[in-house]
Image (cartoon, rainbow, N blue to C red):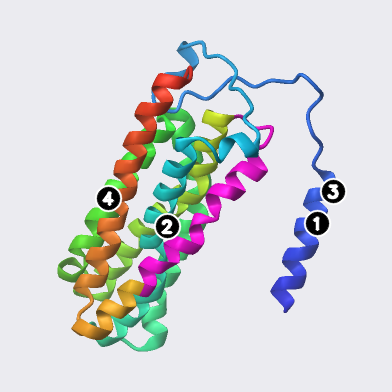
């Protein structure tokens, strides 16, 4: 209840001080695929309203990609503490340090990821991050054999979660404009609920197999699917927009 009140007050205060830019104000699209973005002139992105946005196949690709990659993050949050307790025989208090490490890079990693995105390109950072995330999930049962290695894996997975929340809005704005970004990204973000199914299925696999490996494999597989969808999105956006 206390957190609810605090978040409500801060959110409402922030909403009251936000002001829309003047009519006709435009911002050039960020080149999300090239490193030296300052050397290439780009055209303003057309602002696509929500009713047209949901009719584009790019919306469904973005929606599916977010659902896939977010599933891995939710699986990590749900299963890493239990893994630390049951497999590594750690106490609940010690096991919680792995999730704390995850939260550390998840929170502080977002501005860092944003900076790297501006410097090297959004899609490039997302591809690298999700390759790392998928690899960590698939190898975690063999790599995380003690607390420190589990913490290391958690730090890497936290960066993946940070990347998802920091850069998916950038993809939406870069491809479909910023005027309706709040609604458009809200529509894409509805995939968060579907992404939670990965964690649910992972827990179910744990129950029936008595092993964490299938659950972490599933999280790795959904991350790979999300990554492939981003490649499809990249090709489509390069053909239809000024982004190259």
Q: Which residue is identified by label 1?
A: 12
Residue 108 image point, x, y percent: 51, 53
**In contact (CB < 8 Å): disc 3 and disc 1:** yes
Nearest to the observer: residue 236 or residue 107: 236
Query: Which circle, 3 or 2, is nearer the viewer?
Result: 2
**In contact (CB < 8 Å): disc 1 and disc 4:** no
Query: Which circle, 1 or 4, is nearer the viewer?
Result: 4
Q: Which residue is identified by label 4?
A: 224
Give the crowd class for mark 1: few <14, some 14-19, many >=20 residues within 10 Å: few
Q: CA distance from mark 1 to mark 4?
A: 37 Å
Residue 225 vs 99, above or below: the answer is above
Q: Which residue is identified by label 3?
A: 16
Q: Is residue 65 magenta?
A: no
Q: Is residue 195 magenta?
A: yes
Prevailing secondary structure class for the magenta stretch in the rendered image: helix
Whether residue 203 sits left or right of residue 149 in the image: it is right
- Residue displayed at 67% across by 36% down: 180
Q: CA distance from mark 2 to mark 1?
A: 27 Å
> Which one is earlier in the sequence, the residue at label 2 or at label 1?
1
Q: Secondary structure at mark 2?
A: helix
Q: Which residue is identified by label 2?
A: 70
Give the crowd class for mark 2: few <14, some 14-19, many >=20 residues within 10 Å: many
> Which one is earlier in the sequence, the residue at label 3 or at label 4?
3
């Amino acid at each position: 209840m206390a957190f609810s009140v605090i978040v409500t007050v801060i959110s409402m205060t922030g909403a009251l001080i936000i002001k829309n830019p003047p009519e006709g104000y435009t911002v050039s699209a960020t080149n999300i695929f090239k490193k030296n973005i300052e050397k290439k002139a780009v055209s303003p992105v057309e602002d696509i309203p929500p009713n047209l946005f949901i009719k584009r196949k790019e919306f469904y690709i973005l929606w599916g990609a977010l659902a896939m990659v977010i599933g891995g993050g939710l699986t990590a949050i749900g299963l890493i503490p239990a893994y630390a307790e049951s497999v590594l025989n750690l106490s609940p208090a010690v096991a919680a340090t792995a999730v704390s490490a995850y939260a550390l890079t998840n929170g502080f990693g977002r501005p860092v990821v944003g900076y790297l995105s501006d410097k090297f390109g959004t899609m490039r950072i997302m591809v690298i991050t999700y390759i790392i995330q998928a690899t960590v999930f698939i190898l975690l049962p063999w790599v995380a054999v003690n607390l420190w290695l589990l913490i290391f894996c958690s730090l890497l997975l936290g960066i993946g979660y940070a990347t998802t929340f920091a850069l998916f809005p950038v993809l939406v704005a870069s491809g479909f404009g910023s005027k309706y970004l709040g609604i458009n990204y809200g529509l894409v973000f509805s995939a968060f609920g579907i992404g939670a199914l990965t964690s649910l299925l992972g827990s179910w696999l744990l129950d029936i197999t008595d092993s964490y490996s299938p659950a972490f494999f599933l999280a790795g597989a959904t991350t790979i699917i999300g990554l492939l969808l981003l490649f499809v999105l990249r090709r489509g956006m390069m053909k239809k927009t000024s982004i190259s």
